[in-house]
Image (cartoon, rainbow, N blue to C red):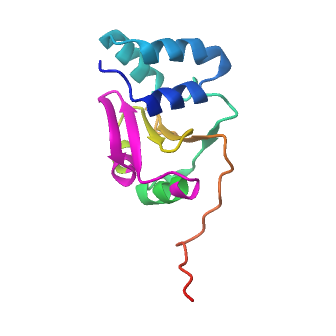
Amino acid sequence: MASLPPSVIEALEAFAAPEQRGTVHDLTQATTDEARDRLAAMLESADWVDMNAKHPMGPDRSDPEGMRRLLQAMGADGRCAVLSSTGTEDDRDLGGALDQVLHQDHGALVVCRPGPLAFLVTAADEHWLLSDREIPQLTGPISIVRP
């Protein structure tokens, strides 16, 4: 397995529960296929995530455009990294990455820039926002103010 992008390593280590940090750190540094498989298996649930950093997202936040708007309202730019069982991609379009992970059957993590901010989709189709930031309440389209 190629090494993980720094933004993915930073997010995994930032969001790991205290008792999981050593395991997560070891997996991010490993380069074997076994380590990649274990890391992908870890993404199948949110059990590895610190309880203070994970926020459940309901069905109303399951569309890619709504999640993109929320993440960008929290400071994410338009590029991200994706970690899933199919591999790791760096420098992806945020909207395209969200569309991909919301329509697959296995766990995946979308890591936003700047971090730490991420979106986790588990194999059980649970959606989690991973952040230590306040979550804004978005209602309807964002209006444009003109002079």
The question of residue 76 being in magenta is answered with yes
What span is colored magenta in the figure? 72-98
Q: Nearer the viewer, residue 58 or 1?
A: 1
Viewer can see residue 103: no
User: Which quadrant of the structure image shows residue 147?
Assistant: bottom right
Residue 95, placed above or below residue 140: above
Picture coordinates of residue 25, whole percent (x, y): 52, 16
Q: In x, y percent, where is residue 98?
A: 40, 48
Q: Position of residue 116 (x, y in %)?
A: 57, 38
Compared across the picture, whether 55 is left or right of 126 comes to right
Q: Residue at x 39, y 48 (%)?
A: 79
Q: Does residue 104 appear left or right of residue 70 in this picture?
A: left
Q: Is residue 146 above or below residue 142?
A: below
Q: Dividing the image into 4 quarters, which one contains the N terminus? A: top left
Q: Is residue 135 above or below residue 115?
A: below
Residue at 41 percent across and 44 percent down: it is: 80
* Corner quadrant of residue 89: top left
